[in-house]
Image (spheres, coloured by chain):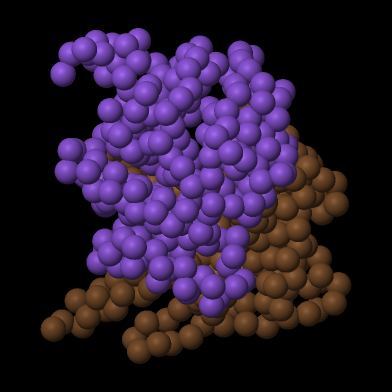
Chain colours: A brown, B purple
Amino acid sequence: MSLRREVREVQIVQVLAYGILLGGMYALLASGVTLIFGVLDVVNVAQGAFLVMSALFTWQVWSVTGIEPLLLIPVNAALLFVIGWIIYRGMVARVAPQGPSMTVLLMFGIALVIEGTLNLVFGNKFKSVTPEYFTWSVKIGDIVLPVPQLISGVLAIAILGLIYVFLRVSWAGRAVRATAQNREGAALVGISHKTASALAFGIGAATAGAGGVLLSIMYPVYPATQYDWIARLLGIIVLGGLGSIPGAVAGSLLLGVMEAFAVTYVPQWSTLFFYGTILAILVFRPQGLMGSVTREDVV
Amino acid sequence: MGDALLTMRDVQAGYGGGLVLQGVDLELEPGSITCIVGPNGAGKSTVLRVISGLLTASAGSVRYDGQELVGRSPADILRAGIAQVPQSRALFPHMTVRDNILMGGYIIRRERELLRQRVSMVEELIPLLKDRSNDYAGNLSGGQRRMVEIGRALMLDPRLILMDEPSLGLDPKSVATVAELIREVTSTGRTVLLVEQNVRLGMNLARYGVVMEQGKVALTGDADGLADNPEVASMYLGRAKDQP
């Protein structure tokens, strides 16, 4: 095998690994959005704002105390869970009976309020959390990966795994899934729709809380970064099939890998590749990658 | 009828602006099957939704075993011993049959031993649930889904079961299986309130019949007597009384 070919193969594996790590990050955040949609029929367009809020909070705490930023993952996740719970019980639950369009407007309004507040507090400038390992990279076999991306991707996948186990094994998680699959059926077995919805909203927001910490060590952020993120996340959940967590994960990994290859080989076209992939797949599979596949021929 | 297990008095309820139930009076005898029949839009399913708490009555009272049910949550009503098997599509399609059955015991989830016993009891009564326990509910046929729905309702060992058109969309063989299961369910003293478009099946299963029209109870009586009523026979059984 020629040296040139060998180098090319190593580079492909490296880009693939990077794409999977990036996809893991997308998967964590997108699963939060799709969980909320699945249970509540609410498109949480404020997820990007939640994410940036968490990232900037991380920057603030890190820059003042010098604390290891990753230690803030449980703190920010818990904080955003509570904020999500309050937003659901205080606002979304009241507006939801008016229909999905009103909740989209509500969540967009909340995103703007968060962005405006962050602008006032942090200013409209990029902030970067740069712990000691920010510039490190690690060699695994022949491939080299930046440590922040590696940590973020691995932790994002691990957190996603925890959420998956929670939803599969715990009664609270089963109640959330049951409500997502059949709201009336859930009520008939005694599950409170409001409690399950508040829990789903809280978990969805918590993914942004945890993701914000991971984001802060990967990329510089400023308040308006939320638009870039929410656009990507909405694209991912539509691609995966609205409300489907496995779909969101599959879509995230696919787009993470696509983006990594595009950034490496055709960087000027990377954004086009990201959204172009979504468009191309939806043309042939409008229900998304993992839209409903259950029998519809029976009542 | 002796002391009623459930009594509805002048119940009014509806969706949005209009009233679907316009003063319903109904009594259920303990241990009996009562079947409600009537044309589409008469309010049959709405009666069940009011009893199970999915819909709150705007007026009137629903008393069950000495307790008022109006205003109580579906979970509270389940705890009181009333379970509903809704019209269709009530399962969790992306959960396995076993998980669907387990979810029927959601309100007793902390009593693990009881939960385990109930799963065994239900699987013994409906062997299909054990045979298909790892299949996703969304991949079952209509008849199989109905069995899972009934099994799920039995997880709380309810005294009163509300069944909304259990034969809907089923082939004749599945209808017979479901009918047999309903008879078995009541053989241990449970009370069943049944809504059924298949009037012949419903009256055949039931001891008492109720005819609803335009949100009110138009006729009540023994199921056999109602089936012989010329008006009911011609409207719902497709024949006059004297015809075979």
Q: Nearer the viewer, residue A49 or B98?
A: B98
Q: Residue at x 63, y 55 (%)?
A: B79
Residue at horizontal 47 percent and vertical 53 percent from the top: B189
Name the residue rendered at 62%, 77% in the picture. A134
Camera-side residue of B3 and B80: B3
Please name the residue shown 50% across and 14% down the image.
Answer: B218
The quarter of the displayed image where residue A206 is located: bottom right
Q: Is residue A284 left or right of residue A277?
A: left
Q: Is residue A149 left or right of residue B98?
A: right
Residue A3 in the image, given as x and y percentages of width and height = 21, 83
Above or below, B58 relative to B189: above
| Residue A149 higher or lower than A223, as above or below | below
Q: For this rendering, which residue is in front, A9 or B60?
A: B60
The answer to whether A183 is drawn above or below residue B43 in the figure is below
- Residue A221 picture location, percent across and down: 67, 57
What x and y, as percent, mark residue A295? Answer: 26, 45
Query: Which quarter of the rendered picture does the C terminus of chain B lie within?
Result: top left
| A51 or A190, nearer to the observer | A190
* Vertical order, A115 against A68 (above or below): above
Q: What is the quadrant of the N terminus of chain B in the image?
A: top right
Could you tell me if residue A130 is visible in this image?
A: no
Which residue is farthest front?
B2
Whether residue B28 can be seen here: yes
Residue A32 percent coordinates (x, y)? 56, 55
Number of disc labels:
0
